Amino acid sequence: MKRKLLCGLLAALTLTCATVKAAPSRVVPVQVDGTVLSQGVNYLQSGVTYVPLRGLLDAFGGWSVWWDSSRKVAAAASGSQSVTANPSRNTVTVNGRTYSGKVFVERGRTYIPLRTLATALGGSVAWDPQLGGAAVTSPGADHNAMDLYWLSRIISAESQGENMTGQIAVGNVVLNRVAAKEFPNTIPAVIFDRKHDVQFTPVSNGTVYLPPTAKSVEAAKRVLNGENTAGKALYFYAPALSQGTWINANRAYLKTIGCHRFYL
């Protein structure tokens, strides 16, 4: 009887173990300070984003990364700072402090938990639902990564053919809306606002998802630094592309810059 019971328990245990599978993972984009990581791929598994160590630290800038074959760990250094990622122990050590977290090697790249390393080095990480991935602001960065990413893209999509004054003006409208009580209070939320239908044409036609021009990135940074060429304008449109019927009927005209008319 005892033998039958033991065999039954072993069979149940075997069946249970056989049905346990590793949590599924999927590839996700990760951007650092407005630029999408291009080294290898990034994975999301059980709510944790994993990125190649070298790719992240190269994006931060100023780091040397190498594989220490004697210790079988990935190592990195920048001035007085150091990082060690140990796949056999599933640990990441940053400046002498060790953190537990899955570390693995795939196709010659050492993967580490993104949030663990980025925050340990003084950066920040946020999930961006519009990107469908993570936005990383590097340590000491001048601008929030998600703000720069989307502001540069809406400027590029709306006005990449304009001069710098015109591109800054488009960015000003976005920030003016962030500050106005009748609009959402973050840059991404303003851009993707649908309370009264789509607010910006590039959101509906998809051009907001295209990489921005270098000039538009510069314009976005200048807007975030406080430059303003559009005053308190909350609306704009291009007469060559739209009649602007509602804006003309309901908002006060302010000025024209390049191909765009701006309204309060």
Image (cartoon, grey):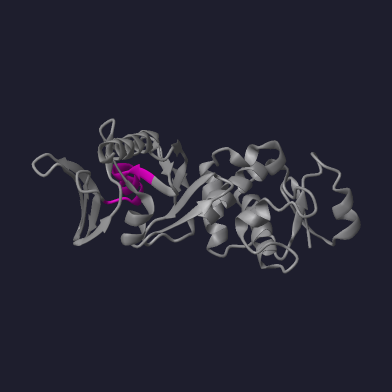
**Magenta segment: does it hold 41?**
no
**Which quadrant of the figure has residue 111?**
top left
In the orientation shown, which residue stands out farthest toward the right?
Answer: 249
Which residue is more in the foreground, 255 or 91?
A: 91
**Magenta segment: does it hold 54?**
yes
Q: Residue at x 34, y 63 (%)?
A: 122
- The answer to whether residue 88 of the structure is visible from this angle is yes
Which residue is more in the foreground, 42 or 32?
A: 42
Which residue is more in the foreground, 243 or 88?
A: 88
Determine whether 214 is above or below 187 in the image.
above
**Which quadrant of the figure has residue 189?**
bottom right
| Quadrant position of the C terminus in the picture | bottom right
Q: Residue at x 55, y 45 (%)?
A: 131
**Which quadrant of the figure has residue 20?**
top left
Picture coordinates of residue 88 (x, y %)?
19, 44
- The answer to whether residue 161 of the structure is visible from this angle is no
Picture coordinates of residue 56 (x, y %)?
34, 47
57 on left or right of 37? left
Determine whether 141 is above or below 157 in the image.
below
225 on left or right of 106? right
Picture coordinates of residue 133 (x, y %)?
50, 45
7 on left or right of 231? left
Q: Residue at x 59, y 40 (%)?
A: 209
Q: Residue at x 66, y 57 (%)?
A: 174
Q: Which residues are magenta?
A: 50-62
73 on left or right of 154? left
Picture coordinates of residue 255 (x, y %)?
77, 58
What secondary structure is the stretch in magenta mostly built from?
helix
